[in-house]
């Protein structure tokens, strides 16, 4: 690594977000333009710069004098649609309604650096993310106040029979994605088997920070008092082409040993039968006891160009033990889901349909009698059609309706996509939707339209962008005022060679030797 | 008859040779006053012996021969120098033309090189003179119907052509037609024209099976092409057949013509989904996949170009278990970045649809997206909800939940079923105002069958958030 790269890396922890973004850019330049690596070494860097325009109308609490609100009862509706809660004896009626529009321009810079050639199977890998808000409120985009994240940074030694990793890394299993600082060792005792053990300091999922870090304390007054230590084992076995099995046990315990934050286990399997497959998985909460989720899914293609699938599922919310929520006896639902996909016109027409039904568990709440009108079942249905009338054109349409506990939606979507060869794509779309959720009265249909474009800048760089606007008649009665606009611009690029393709030859440039006018 | 042949041989052949020699001379040499020297040089081969022998060095006379007369005395000195051999990929040989003419039709230099009347009125040959005998089959120089190799050498034999000239070779219009990437194979198999501009490295850039295709292996390697191709990323067009539900339909095609697949795909393209080289649907023979060439990386590039739609339509939302079990070799096609695009946190454009963040409530209630696979709902969600004004701040007015009268008194059932949603806006202390046994009203939130002992044994500290003392003795 060059001196410039080292300086840029050192500045990444700068307290200011703009400085961190600049440092990420400096690091990129230093790595790309720095001293050439040895002949067998190479560095590949993938970058993504994302700029968004977000416009939101945050909710605000408001009140009116009770005497100014016509009607009687606990809930009263104004002529303009506003619904206020009037508690008898109080001088004011209250509601929550959208405030003035505020906007922001969050910027996210991602870098993925992979370096190899330091010996057989030795590799270094890092995944970095810088954030900033160029304009507007930093509250409108998740974690915008966190200027820099090191999502992953590890050294790896991989050979035919084993793999070692040390550093910040992701652990992927049937339990989902977990990020931790530690070590992982995996062995392949047989070609069909994979065993892995891992341990290290656990990080909050989605926040990529230690449990005792400031990010969590800012949003939760009862944050975990101690760091967590994550440890687990994972096994996979594929005895043949038709069967795959996997199992994972994972515990996240307090560093002081006075309890666990979570203790989970999962098992999953897949069996291929003829032209179809059966897949199943189960996830258990060993700390609280019980099954979090169990799925059984079957897929078959009994007819040409037709695929059928069906699924049954049991789900129960799961909470880590540093919170009180797990002690609130959460209940879940059982669900059945089925659908079909058919393609015709030599594959240019694709039609999909799906429907689902679910039944919620008995909450056995003391106030259940008073809440007897709560929905105890939900259902959903939807269909999607995609048609490519000619090369480079695709028409899409979708419709979906869903009603469940606490929420409902109905929406339709249509779009046209024009593929400009390898140069990119252009797309326009329009949509309409109705939503009601959070046990709140809602009115109005939201209409939206937008356009997106994707442009190939070179063989290894691409830019995408788009803009959309929404119109929401009757927004005054709604919690979320959808008279909003959105925009985004993203540039993705890749420099450096693919492993096994020319070593470091292409590391210094985005493209190869000049191609002007040549036919070779 | 023999006297007539002798006359032809004595007169026409030298003349033909002269024209041929002059045809090879660069334009700058046209100024040589041939006619002024007509009486000195009765035959063409006297100065241009190389036109007869094929010796390039003898194609022009040495400069010293001029000085025999132009010595400053008999005649003034001149600075004429023979031109350097011209770099060209033209297929032309003076001796061959002489042999073709033979005794029956002796070659006549002037037939190609004459620029006027008289035996020494010669100059460089124009291409039109070539076409007088060699009819051009196309309506333009680069027409697809033309056999390029008739006039042009294979690139590997045109060693005098510098790399810059090779890079600047014109691109025929036929190569610009739609679908050329997928249809050029037939032409490559039947014609030799490819070799005029291409070498083996030209094909190896994209063809993963280059070593197995005779139309490629018969092309000679060329260091100039190799240098130009080095580092260039292969570009794969998407065949029309690969659109739509190709993921489900490709099995039959692969069984029928696996060799065709190998033009772009390598074994990892198949084994990425079909375990251990065998197919999921039983359509493709394992040995056919195993026969695919295995250069590293090609499958990665094909996937990155979006050349195939391998996964079923709803795969994005349901691949977690498959990826976790190792059933799929994700890494054979996908880079880790592609996972992070969706699973790295807030900027998850690849996984969630556009503006999902503002429209996700119904999906969360439905639980279809398995949010907890990536997010901690009690922290990640609340972080954003607070910014959008959804954070509760401990208010008890329940003014937000207008869909249910007496919400505070009747929310129990809703809370137990949708507790993840509650936790995405409310802090623990909001609930503890009523439910804490220590600082609240002592309303028990525990449902029937609550495993107090089990939880206490796992983390007694959590119990103390609401209870002064651990109400359960650890078993």
Image (spheres, coloured by chain):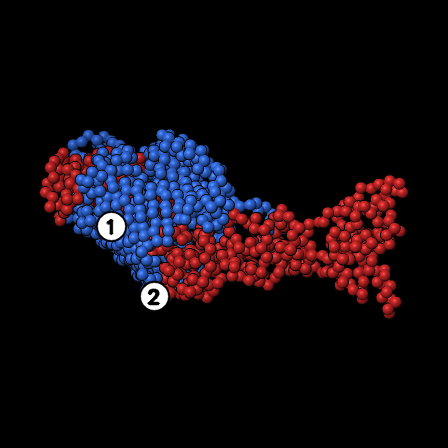
Chain colours: A blue, B red
Q: Residue A420 appears at what percent x and percent y? A: 51, 49
Q: Residues within 10 Å of mark 1 (few under 14, many from 20)?
A: many
Q: Position of residue A142 (x, y in %)?
A: 33, 38
Q: Which residue is mark 1?
A: A249
To which chain does the residue with label 2 belong? A
Query: Which of the numbered marks, if any, corresponds to residue B179?
Result: none
Q: Residue furthest bottom?
A: B1
The relative height of residue A94 versus residue A172 in the rendered view (above or below) is above
Q: Please report the residue visible at 56 percent of the width from the left and 59 percent of the height from the top.
A: B216
Q: Residue at x 71, y 57 (%)?
A: B92
Q: Residues within 10 Å of mark 2 (few under 14, many from 20)?
A: some
Figure quadrant of the N terminus of chain B: bottom right
Q: Depth check: give the residue in front, B101 or B62.
A: B62
Please provide percent x and percent y for residue B99.
76, 63
Give the Cα separation between the discs numbered 1 and 2: 32 Å
- In the visual, does A423 lie left or right of A367? right
Task: Tell how many labels.
Answer: 2
The answer to whether the residue labelled 1 contacts the one labelled 2, judged by CB atoms less than 8 Å apart, is no
Q: Which residue is mark 2?
A: A274
Image mark 1: chain: A
Q: Residue at x 20, y 49 (%)?
A: A286
In this view, B390 is above or below A419: above
Residue A382: tell me if it is visible: no
Q: Earlier in the sequence, mark 1 or mark 2?
A: 1
């Amino acid at each position: 690594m060059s001196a410039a790269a080292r300086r840029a890396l050192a500045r990444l922890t700068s307290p200011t977000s703009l400085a961190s973004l600049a440092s990420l850019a400096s690091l990129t330049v230093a790595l790309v333009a720095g001293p050439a690596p040895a002949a067998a070494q190479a560095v590949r860097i993938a970058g993504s710069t994302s700029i968004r325009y977000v416009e939101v109308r945050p909710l605000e609490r408001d009140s009116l004098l009770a005497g100014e609100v016509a009607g009687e009862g606990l809930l009263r509706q104004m002529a303009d649609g506003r619904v206020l809660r009037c508690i008898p004896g109080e001088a004011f009626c209250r509601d929550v309604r959208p405030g003035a529009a505020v906007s922001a321009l969050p910027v996210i810079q991602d870098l993925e650096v992979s370096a190899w050639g330091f010996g057989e199977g030795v590799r270094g890998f890092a995944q970095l993310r810088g954030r900033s808000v160029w304009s507007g409120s930093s509250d409108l985009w998740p974690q915008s106040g966190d200027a820099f994240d090191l999502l992953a940074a590890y050294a790896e030694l991989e050979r035919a029979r084993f793999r070692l990793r040390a550093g910040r890394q992701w652990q992927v299993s049937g339990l989902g994605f977990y990020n931790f600082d530690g070590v992982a060792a995996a062995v392949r005792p047989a070609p069909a088997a994979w065993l892995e053990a891992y341990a290290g300091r656990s990080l909050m999922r989605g926040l990529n920070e230690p449990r005792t870090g400031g990010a969590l304390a800012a949003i939760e007054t009862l944050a975990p008092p101690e760091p967590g230590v994550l440890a687990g084992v994972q096994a996979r076995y594929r005895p043949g082409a038709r069967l795959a099995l996997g199992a994972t046990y994972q515990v996240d315990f307090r560093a002081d040993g006075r309890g666990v934050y979570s203790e989970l286990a999962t098992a999953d399997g897949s069996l291929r039968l003829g032209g179809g497959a059966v897949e199943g998985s189960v996830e258990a909460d060993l700390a609280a006891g019980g099954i979090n989720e169990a799925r059984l899914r079957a897929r078959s293609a009994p007819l040409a160009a037709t695929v059928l699938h069906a699924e049954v599922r049991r789900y129960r919310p799961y909470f880590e033990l540093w919170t009180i929520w797990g002690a609130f006896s959460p209940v879940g639902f059982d669900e059945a889901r089925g659908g079909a996909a058919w393609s015709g016109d030599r594959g240019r027409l694709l039609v999909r349909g799906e429907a689902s039904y679910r039944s919620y568990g008995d909450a056995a709440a003391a106030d259940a009698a008073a809440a007897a009108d709560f929905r105890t079942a939900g259902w959903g249905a939807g269909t999607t059609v995609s048609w490519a009338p000619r090369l480079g054109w695709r028409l899409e349409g979708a419709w979906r309706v869903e009603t469940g506990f606490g929420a409902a939606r109905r929406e339709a979507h249509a779009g046209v996509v024009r593929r400009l060869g390898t140069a990119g794509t252009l797309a326009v779309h329009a949509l309409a939707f109705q939503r009601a959720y959070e046990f709140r009265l809602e009115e109005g249909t939201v209409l939206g339209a937008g356009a997106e474009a994707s442009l190939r800048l070179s063989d290894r760089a691409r830019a995408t962008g788009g803009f959309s606007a929404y119109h929401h008649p009757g927004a005054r009665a709604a919690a979320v005022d959808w008279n909003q606009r959105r925009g985004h611009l993203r540039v993705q690029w890749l420099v450096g060679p693919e492993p096994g393709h020319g070593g470091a030859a292409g590391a210094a440039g985005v493209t190869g030797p000049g191609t002007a006018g040549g036919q070779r | 008859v023999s006297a007539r042949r002798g006359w032809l041989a004595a007169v026409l052949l030298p003349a033909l040779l002269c024209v041929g020699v002059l045809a090879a001379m660069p334009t700058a040499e046209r100024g040589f006053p041939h006619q002024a020297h007509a009486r000195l040089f009765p035959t063409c081969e006297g100065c241009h012996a190389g036109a007869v022998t094929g010796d390039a060095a003898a194609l022009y006379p040495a400069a010293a021969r001029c000085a025999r007369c132009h010595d400053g005395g008999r005649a003034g000195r001149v600075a004429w120098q023979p031109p350097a051999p011209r770099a060209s990929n033209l297929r032309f040989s003076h001796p061959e033309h002489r042999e073709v003419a033979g005794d029956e039709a002796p070659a006549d230099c002037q037939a190609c090189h004459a620029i006027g009347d008289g035996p020494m009125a010669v100059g460089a040959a124009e291409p039109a003179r070539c076409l007088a005998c060699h009819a051009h089959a196309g309506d333009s120089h680069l027409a697809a119907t033309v056999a390029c190799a008739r006039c042009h050498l294979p690139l590997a034999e045109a060693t005098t052509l510098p790399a810059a000239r090779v890079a600047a070779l014109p691109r025929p219009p036929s190569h610009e037609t739609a679908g050329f990437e997928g249809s050029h194979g037939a032409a490559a198999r039947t014609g030799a024209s490819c070799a005029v501009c291409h070498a083996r490295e030209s094909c190896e850039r994209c063809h993963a099976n280059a070593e197995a295709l005779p139309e490629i292996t018969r092309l000679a390697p060329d260091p100039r092409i190799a240098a130009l191709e080095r580092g260039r990323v292969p570009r794969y067009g998407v065949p029309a057949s690969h659109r739509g539900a190709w993921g489900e339909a490709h099995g039959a095609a692969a069984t029928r013509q696996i060799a065709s697949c190998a033009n772009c795909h390598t074994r990892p393209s198949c084994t990425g989904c079909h375990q251990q080289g065998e197919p999921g649907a039983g359509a493709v023979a394992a040995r056919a996949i195993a026969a695919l060439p295995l250069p590293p990386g090609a499958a990665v590039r094909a996937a990155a170009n979006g050349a195939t739609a391998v996964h079923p339509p709803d795969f994005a939302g349901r691949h977690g278990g498959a990826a976790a079990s190792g059933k799929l070799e994700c890494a054979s096609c996908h880079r880790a970045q592609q996972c992070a695009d969706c699973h790295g946190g807030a900027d998850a454009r690849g996984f969630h649809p556009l503006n999902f963040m503002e429209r996700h409530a119904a999906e969360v209630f439905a639980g279809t997206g398995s949010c907890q696979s990536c997010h901690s709902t009690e922290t990640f969600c609340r972080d954003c909800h607070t910014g959008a004004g959804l954070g509760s701040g401990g208010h008890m007015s329940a003014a937000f939940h207008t869909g249910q009268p007496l919400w505070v008194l009747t929310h129990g059932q809703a809370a137990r079923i949708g507790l993840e949603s509650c936790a995405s806006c409310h802090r623990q202390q909001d609930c503890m105002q009523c439910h804490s046994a220590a600082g609240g009203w002592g309303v028990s939130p525990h449902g029937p069958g609550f495993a107090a002992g089990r939880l206490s044994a796992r983390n007694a500290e959590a119990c103390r958030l609401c209870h002064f003392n651990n109400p359960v003795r650890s078993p």
